[in-house]
Amino acid sequence: MIKTHTTTEFIAKEGWKYVGVFFILFLFSLSVNFFQWVFLFLFLGTVFIYRNFERISAEDDKMALLAPADGHVVDISKVILQDGKEFLKLEIRKNIWNMSILRSPILANISSTKRVHGLLLNSESPLFKKLGERAIIKLESEHKPMFIIVTAGIFSSGIELFKSIGPLKFSQRFGLLLDGGVELLLPIDIRVKVSLGDSVRAGESVLGYFAYGIKNDKQ
């Protein structure tokens, strides 16, 4: 289901109202000669936060896995879910100054989206993942199913998803997150090409490659 229509605008449409408000306040401050620099900073800061630049992928191989969000890699580990299935978890932590647009890491179809309502917490808090506002997105592709878990941080207004079900193109914009974390639950034998602490860019940086011969297993 499409909730917004952000495409290639220089500023994401979800931020237009905030940019407009601070621009009006800046003009008002000029007219009354009151804290002009403060409102100019707020206006420019809002434009920067909601910037929506184009990205060119570093790889067009269909086996490549792109970063879904800007930020730093903070965790690469094996996890076992309650149903006993094993996944490789790769977590990216972003702050409010990273570009806020989320992009599809692969050519896939969103088969389900589950929202878990919670609190907007500092991403460094031990309760961030347990109590935070998050969305769990399941992707189906020619590879084995994978999950994207988006958790909103303290400086987010929530999680904007442009699609909750349906097809996604390679590097397509699918959501917006101001602050928080994005976890990928991946096939266990994916070849990871990044390390802890690496800086990545959504829709551009390659996180790894799926193994050839792995096909979608829905059982």
Image (tube, rainbow, N blue to C red):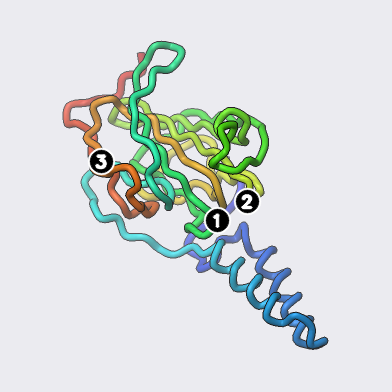
99 left or right of 206 in image: right
- Looking at numbered disc 3 in the image, what kind of residue is underneath it? Gly
- Cα–Cα span, label 2 and label 1: 7 Å
Q: Position of residue 59 (x, y in %)?
A: 23, 52
The quarter holding residue 33 reads bottom right
96 left or right of 213 in image: right
The residue that mark 1 highlights is: 96
Q: Are marks 2 and 1 in contact (CB under 8 Å)?
A: yes
Q: Quadrant of the N terminus?
A: top right
User: What is the residue that sits farthest to the right in this orientation?
Assistant: 32
Closer-to-camera residue (154/10) = 154
The residue tagged with tag 1: helix, strand or loop? loop
- Looking at numbered disc 1 in the image, what kind of residue is underneath it? Ile
User: What is the residue that sits farthest to the left in this orientation?
Assistant: 212
- Cα–Cα span, label 3 and label 1: 25 Å
The residue tagged with tag 3: helix, strand or loop? strand
The residue that mark 2 highlights is: 155
The residue tagged with tag 2: helix, strand or loop? loop
Q: Quadrant of the C terminus?
A: top left
**Sequence order check: which comes first, mark 3 or mark 1?**
1
Q: Position of residue 26 (x, y in %)?
A: 72, 78
Query: Where is 196 relative to 83, above or below?
Result: below
The residue that mark 3 highlights is: 208
Badge number at residue 185: none
Query: Where is 3 relative to 110, above or below?
Result: below
Q: Are marks 3 and 1 in contact (CB under 8 Å)?
A: no
Q: Position of residue 31 (x, y in %)?
A: 79, 88
10 Å neighbourhood of mark 2: few (<14), some, or many (≥20)? some
The quarter holding residue 210 reads top left
Whether residue 2 is visible here, answered yes or no, is no
Residue pictured at 45% horizontal, 29% vertical: 138
